[in-house]
Image (cartoon, rainbow, N blue to C red):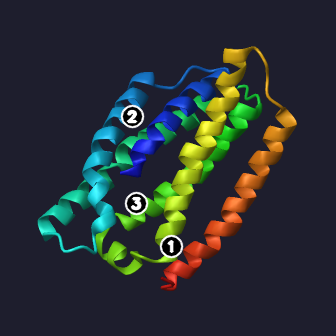
């Protein structure tokens, strides 16, 4: 369900990467279709967070199928983003750095979400700190870093004033280091069964 929070960040990243790589977005139509598919499948997969509730097993399998199908549009997005960056002249300004941080952090969270989409795995890891870590990676990677990328990208266009590059680099470094120092131990403890 919280994949819907990612849609604005996905749109912002898809605008920032072509600007700072000097290449057009690899397949704009595929990215637009992927965003629409994520919106639809994200609504269908919300029950993934309720696998341990007393819900009929057929609904659980449907939710698992929708959650696993999300790997297709998300994979299309990541392939398009990487293809846009490939062989481009990349300028590492603040919006691009935040966008790259968002992509890398999202990849951790979405891989964990794909693992949690499988019903037996979710039954074992529900209500553990691993589930908290996976959700944290998605929220930090998408809404936080994607939102900061959008802010650093559109603020100068709206106001005519740029934001500090040094402060952006320092804050990105603190966020990335902080999220990994916080969430990696949580994930490892959750895999050991820590509630």
Q: Is residue 86 visible?
A: no
Q: CA distance from mark 3 to mark 1?
A: 13 Å
The residue sitting at the right extreme is 166
- The percent coordinates of residue 174 (x first, y second) are 77, 54
Q: In the picture provided, is 69 more to the left or to the right than 92?
A: left
Q: In the picture provided, is 75 more to the left or to the right than 147?
A: left
Point out the tag, 3 or 1, that comes first from the N-terminus: 3
- The percent coordinates of residue 34 (x first, y second) are 37, 35
Q: CA distance from mark 3 to mark 2?
A: 17 Å
Indicate whether 19 appears above or below 182. Answer: above
Q: Nearer the viewer, residue 114 or 11?
A: 11
- The percent coordinates of residue 38 (x first, y second) are 35, 41
Indicate whether 64 appears above or below 90. Answer: below
Quadrant position of residue 37: top left
Q: Nearer the viewer, mark 3 or mark 1?
A: 1
* Category of crowding for the residue at label 2, using alpha-carbon neighbours closer than 10 angstroms: few (below 14), some (14–19), many (at least 20): many
Q: CA distance from mark 1 to mark 2?
A: 27 Å
Quadrant position of residue 52: bottom left
Q: Residue at x 55, y 35 (%)?
A: 81
Q: Residue at x 72, y 53 (%)?
A: 175
Do residues under tags 1 and 2 come within 8 Å of each other at their CB atoms?
no
* Category of crowding for the residue at label 3, using alpha-carbon neighbours closer than 10 angstroms: few (below 14), some (14–19), many (at least 20): some
Q: Nearer the viewer, residue 38 or 166?
A: 166
Badge 2 element: helix
The residue to which callout 2 is attached is 35
Point out the tag, 3 or 2, that comes first from the N-terminus: 2
Which label is found at residue 114? Answer: 3
Point out the tag, 1 or 2, that comes first from the N-terminus: 2
- The percent coordinates of residue 184 (x first, y second) are 63, 70
The residue to which callout 1 is attached is 130
Badge 3 element: helix
Badge 1 element: helix
């Amino acid at each position: 369900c919280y994949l819907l929070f990612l849609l604005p960040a996905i749109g912002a990243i898809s605008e920032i990467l072509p600007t700072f790589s000097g290449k057009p977005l690899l397949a704009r139509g595929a990215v637009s279709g992927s965003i629409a598919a994520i919106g639809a499948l994200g609504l269908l997969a919300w029950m993934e967070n309720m696998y341990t509730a007393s819900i009929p097993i057929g609904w659980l399998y449907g939710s698992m199928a929708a959650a696993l199908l999300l790997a297709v549009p998300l994979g299309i997005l990541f392939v398009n983003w990487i293809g846009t960056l490939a062989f481009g002249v990349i300028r590492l300004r603040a919006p691009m750095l935040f966008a790259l941080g968002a992509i890398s952090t999202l990849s951790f969270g979405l891989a964990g979400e794909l693992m949690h989409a499988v019903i037996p795995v979710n039954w074992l890891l529900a209500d553990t700190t691993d589930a908290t870590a996976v959700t944290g990676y998605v929220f930090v990677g998408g809404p936080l870093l994607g939102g900061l990328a959008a802010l650093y990208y559109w603020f100068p266009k709206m106001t005519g004033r740029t934001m500090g590059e040094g402060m952006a680099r320092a804050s990105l470094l603190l966020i990335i280091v902080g999220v990994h120092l916080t969430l990696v131990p949580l994930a490892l403890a959750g895999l050991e069964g820590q509630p």
